[in-house]
Amino acid sequence: MKKKWKVIIISSVCFSVVVGIGAYITCFPYIFRYIFDSSKFNITEKETSNDIKIMTYNARGNTTADKYKRSWFYRAKLQFKLIEEEKPDIIGFQECSPIMERYYKRHFKGYDFKEPYDKKKSERGGNLIIYRSDIFSKQAEGFFYLSNTPEKKSKDWGSNNYRTCSYVTLQNKDTEKVYNVINVHLDHKSKEARENQTRVLLEQIYLLNLKNPLILGDFNSGTRSSPFAQLTEAGLHDSLTYSLTPYEGNGTTFHKYGEYLNNGRIDYIFVDPSITVNSYNVIEKKIDGEFPSDHNPVVINIAK
């Protein structure tokens, strides 16, 4: 019996190694471009505006499942071009792994970074928040798990992954207005988990006294879902619904690299009723003929 298990373990390890090597071979042509890319974008060079531009973006983690031009080593440059064009003042990334965070830090200047994971617990990735350092000063920051025990690494209700929330309290240096930017990613498999994770999110917002919330994230839930109802019934505004400028686009946020073009919304920005949303947009386009992620970013402009 022991010999049988030993053979199974060795076979599994060998298979994993082969798969890993195969995946890197498929993206090998793009690795050198990635390593030697010296592009820089400095957000402080953006022209002044009366609005604050906010983006939520599931950037699709670097995974061996994505090969060739879907690999992170190719998509990184596409995301750089997209963000350079949009020039958001605040961005909430989901599925941000350490290698992705390092890329963003190397290429995006003028931003401060709220780390997306708990390094003490060796997290593979999470929800990164970046914000303009010339406009905002950080007052506080935090991190918790969307589980029955938010203070420690845990998952419940059949959640496939450890789901987390990052937040940062920002004060506008000019107006002194304070925002709590909250970045989440709910589970993609368990409906029960998504409902309870939303409940925990709302409870933590109350317990931590996170006033004037801007909740960014991938909720893996449509507009008729329980999480959407929970958030709106708690008094939060769906930024699309409350945008002063009507949005006339398709609105699909998760498209699986173009497979789903009329899939509706699962990525949202919810805002406190005190916040005025001047415009809402979903960036539905390819860069250099390819999608930078399997999600489209959502962008809003709010009044300062």
Image (cartoon, rainbow, N blue to C red):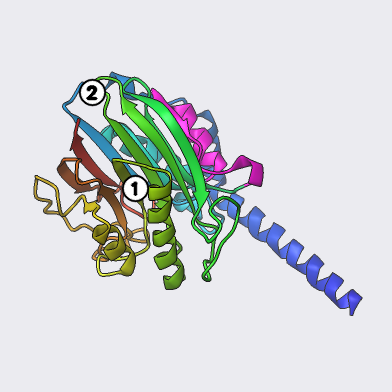
Q: Nearer the viewer, residue 39 or 202?
A: 202
Q: Is residue 230 magenta?
A: no
- Which label belongs to residue 216? 1
Q: Nearer the viewer, residue 231 or 22?
A: 231
x and y, in percent, of residue 118 in the image: 58, 43
Q: Quadrant of residue 234?
A: bottom left
Res. 251 in view: yes
Query: In this rendering, is residue 9 above or below 67?
Result: below
Tell me how far mark 1 sits from mark 2, CA to CA.
22 Å
Question: Which residue in the structure is indicated by mark 2?
Answer: 175
Left or right placement of residue 134 versus residue 161 in this view: left
x and y, in percent, of residue 49 in the image: 18, 25
Amino acid type assigned to the residue bearing label 2 in the image: Thr
Region of the chain picked out in magenta, as a range: 97-122
Q: Nearer the viewer, residue 283 or 156?
A: 156
Q: Residue at x 44, y 58 (%)?
A: 200
